[in-house]
Image: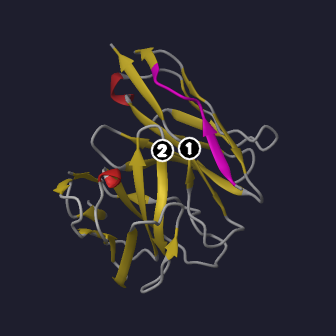
Amino acid sequence: GNSVTQMEGPVTLSEEAFLTINCTYTATGYPSLFWYVQYPGEGLQLLLKATKADDKGSNKGFEATYRKETTSFHLEKGSVQVSDSAVYFCALSDLNQAGTALIFGKGTTLSVSS
Amino acid sequence: DVKVTQSSRYLVKRTGEKVFLECVQDMDHENMFWYRQDPGLGLRLIYFSYDVKMKEKGDIPEGYSVSREKKERFSLILESASTNQTSMYLCASSTLGFGTGGFGRDGYTFGSGTRLTVV
């Protein structure tokens, strides 16, 4: 079945460091891929998405490229800020399988210190 | 600018109580979902609904039921609360209906969550 695997955290960085959070997936068909962010005490917010191979999603300085050959959707940011501290979830949906919901990875906690 | 509203942020209930968690969305979305979030386990789907009065079991439906009498409202019911149901509960909604081939294409809008403690 479909699944998402993302790197375990916590990830601890200093302000202005480069961030990579790895995400790989297993899916039949051609899924859409998403990154969600959850700030402390809040629900999840959509950060970025990509709906087909080689698409790049971007938002708030974060980027991720849909790599079908490596079944990956790694999240990157060139210079993190303290305000980026949150839990990040990779997710997929299989558009060819109606009646299914988004499948989430287990989340990666990012902690950025000044 | 609130789009998905969960009725309570924090809730404390006793073992054996019947518990109702309410979720309302104002975006006219067809699909609504209930997840629970636990440390180390991520988000697990309990139930979802793609239309009024329709429901589908997710990965962990045992001990839960749902109700969707109106398009904008999706209720999660714990028939007899137990301590292992202590968790964060997240409601979400999305556009595009069941069977269109676009289920979940645009992702979900989440509520702020309800942290339920069963004592």
> Quarter-wise, where is residue B38 in the image?
top left
Is the residue at mark 2 from the same chain as the one at mark 1?
no
Residue A24, relative to residue B52: is it above or below? above
Q: Chain of mark 1?
A: A
Q: CA distance from mark 2 to mark 1?
A: 6 Å
Q: Find residue B62 and report its horizontal and vertical position in percent.
A: 45, 66
Q: A16 and A41: which one is in front?
A: A41
Q: Amino acid at mark 1?
A: Gly
> Quarter-wise, where is residue B105 in the image?
bottom right
- Determine whether, in the image, residue B105 is placed left or right of residue A82: right
Disc 2 vs disc 1: Cβ atoms closer than 8 Å?
yes
Element under label 1? loop
Q: Amino acid at mark 2?
A: Gly
Q: Residue at x 53, y 18 (%)?
A: A18
Render colour scheme: secondary structure
Q: Is-magenta flag for residue B39?
A: no
Q: Residue at x 43, y 27 (%)?
A: A110
The local crowd at label 2, few if under 14, some if 14 to 19, many if 20 or more residues have their Cα within 10 Å, is: some
Q: A107 and A20: which one is in front?
A: A107
Residue underneath mark 2: B42
Numbered range of the magenta stretch: A2-11
Q: B84 and A53: which one is in front?
A: B84
Residue underneath mark 1: A105
Q: Chain of mark 2?
A: B
Element under label 2? strand
Residue A68, relative to residue B2: is it above or below? above
Residue A108, relative to residue B29: is it above or below? above
The local crowd at label 1, few if under 14, some if 14 to 19, many if 20 or more residues have their Cα within 10 Å, is: many
Residue B16, relative to residue B66: is it above or below? above
Q: Identify the image quadrant of the C terminus of chain A.
A: top left
Residue at the far right in the pictured view: A69
Q: Find residue B6 and report its horizontal and vertical position in percent.
A: 26, 62
